[in-house]
Image (cartoon, rainbow, N blue to C red):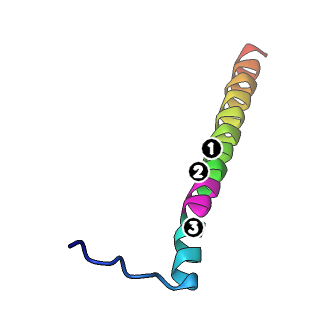
Amino acid sequence: MAKKPVKKSAAKRRQLKATPKKQLAKKVVVKLLRNELRQIRVLLKRHQLKNFAS
């Protein structure tokens, strides 16, 4: 006969439920930051090219 699964406490369950959301939020933030950095780099490159041209 299979062992009865141990019931997790409400707090533990909440924690388990919360973790993926937190990780997702972190991923989104990282993505946004990377996007910002990319844009800044592009702007800098453009700016430098303008400076070289003048």
Q: Main secondary structure of the magenta part?
A: helix
For the residues labelled 2 and 1, the Cα–Cα distance comes to 6 Å
What is the magenta range?
20-25
Which kind of residue does numbered mark 1 sit on? Lys
44 lies above or below 28: above
Q: Which quarter of the picture shows residue 46?
A: top right
Q: Which of the 4 image quarters holds residue 31?
A: top right
Residue situated in front as seen by the camera: 26 or 36: 26
Question: Disc 1 designates what residue?
Answer: 31
Location of residue 5 by image quarter: bottom left
Q: In which quarter of the image is the N terminus?
A: bottom left
Q: Mark 2 points at which residue?
A: 27
**Disc ID at residue 17:** 3
- The answer to whether the residue labelled 2 contacts the one labelled 1, judged by CB atoms less than 8 Å apart, is yes
Residue 20: which disc?
none
Where residue 54 sits: x, y (%)? 79, 16
Circle nearer the viewer, 3 or 2: 3
